[in-house]
């Protein structure tokens, strides 16, 4: 809306006009200003209901991130605790030991059960650290062998759970190294979660004032507003609209980059939500809300 002569003409008032037409059928259009008022009131109610939904989307996304951060931090610390316990164990260098299965993998070397205490302690350490995280049952619910196989390898899992096996220096080094790698992976994941949390905050800093600007339109009695004020309000909404559109464009670019490096990243983060792209959903809803507010301004301006 860039001037009193052209402002309303640039705005589609179809939602209001259609609403007025329907309302006129009910009122007989004896009082068209009443019909307009009732339609705008209906838009106001719809707007206010949607405002809560938009902000709730971002709150839910933030809660999902916080939950994932807590779990990731717990796993990072658990693997670090496991690594420390493993390196403190006494490994058994079994001279002349024969690898199981007839292979050459000294991880699974046995010698009549000698040195099995270290292996037992390694298993206990894993159960008391990695498998003892508060969310383990809900998130994984796996046996020790299955989880070690996923986190390290099948060979390491076989060596760790083997009856009569020994904690050889190679196995000890492999467990410690694998635990360090798992810890680093969780640290990297935490960094990505923090980046996403910052992105949510930036999105909210754009969407919340846009919503507030739209809500302010419905909080006023527009019948007493001057045409100049209505033009200014409309231009203000357009400014917010441009910011939201820029946010959505940038967000789409980020989604493309993130999912190019790590597929299903947002599915992983927001699988518990109604939309795995909460910022895009909230932004689209905000644009719709702004459009409703602009329609209310156009309706009021058309009565001048």
Image: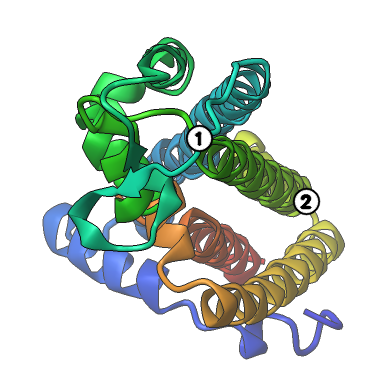
Asked whether, in this view, residue 206 is left or right of residue 129, the answer is right
Q: Secondary structure at mark 1?
A: loop
Q: Residues within 10 Å of mark 1 (few under 14, many from 20)?
A: many
The foreground one among 80 and 253 is 80
Q: Position of residue 113 (x, y in %)?
A: 28, 21
- Residue under the image location 59 percent in, 65 percent down: 303
Q: Position of residue 2 (x, y in %)?
A: 85, 83
The foreground one among 89 and 130 is 89
- Residue under the image location 31 percent in, 65 percent down: 20
Q: CA distance from mark 2 to mark 1?
A: 51 Å
Q: Position of residue 63 (x, y in %)?
A: 51, 29
For disc 1, the marked residue is: 168
- Residue under the image location 85 percent in, 63 percent down: 232
Q: Residues within 10 Å of mark 2 (few under 14, many from 20)?
A: few
- Residue under the image location 37 percent in, 62 percent down: 104
**Residue 38 is at least partly visible in this image:** no
162 w.r.t. 226: above or below: above
The foreground one among 161 and 200 is 161
**Residue 23 is at least partly visible in this image:** yes
230 w.r.t. 88: above or below: below
Asked whether, in this view, residue 254 is left or right of residue 46, the answer is right
For disc 2, the marked residue is: 202
Work out which residue is located at the far left of the displayed protein and give it: 26
Give the position of the C terminus as an image quadrant: bottom right
Q: Secondary structure at mark 2?
A: helix
């Amino acid at each position: 809306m860039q001037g009193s002569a052209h402002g309303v003409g640039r705005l589609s008032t179809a939602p209001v006009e259609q609403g007025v037409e329907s309302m006129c059928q009910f009122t007989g259009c004896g009082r068209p200003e009443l019909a307009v008022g009732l339609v705008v009131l209906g838009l106001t109610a719809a707007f206010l209901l949607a405002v809560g939904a938009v902000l709730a989307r971002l709150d839910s996304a933030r809660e999902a991130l916080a939950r994932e951060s807590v779990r990731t931090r717990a796993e990072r610390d658990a693997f670090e605790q496991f690594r420390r316990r493993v390196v403190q164990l006494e490994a058994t260098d079994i001279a002349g030991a024969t690898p199981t299965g007839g292979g050459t993998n000294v991880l699974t070397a046995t010698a009549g059960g000698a040195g099995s205490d270290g292996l037992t302690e390694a298993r206990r350490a894993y159960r008391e650290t990695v498998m003892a995280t508060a969310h383990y049952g809900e998130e994984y619910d796996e046996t020790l062998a299955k989880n070690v196989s996923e986190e390290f390898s099948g060979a390491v899992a076989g060596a760790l759970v083997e009856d009569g096996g020994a904690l050889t220096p190679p196995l000890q080094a492999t467990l410690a190294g694998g635990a360090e790698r798992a810890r680093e992976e969780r640290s990297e994941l935490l960094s990505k979660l923090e980046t996403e949390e910052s992105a949510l905050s930036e999105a909210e800093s754009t969407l919340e004032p846009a919503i507030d600007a739209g809500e302010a339109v419905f909080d006023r009695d527009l019948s007493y507003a001057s045409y100049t004020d209505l033009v200014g309000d409309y231009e203000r909404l357009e400014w917010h609209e441009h910011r939201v559109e820029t946010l959505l464009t940038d967000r789409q670019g980020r989604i493309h980059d993130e999912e190019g490096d790590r597929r299903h990243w947002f599915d992983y983060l927001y699988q518990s939500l109604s939309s795995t792209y909460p910022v895009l959903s909230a932004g689209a809803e905000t644009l719709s809300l702004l459009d409703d507010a602009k329609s209310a301004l156009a309706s009021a301006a058309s009565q001048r």
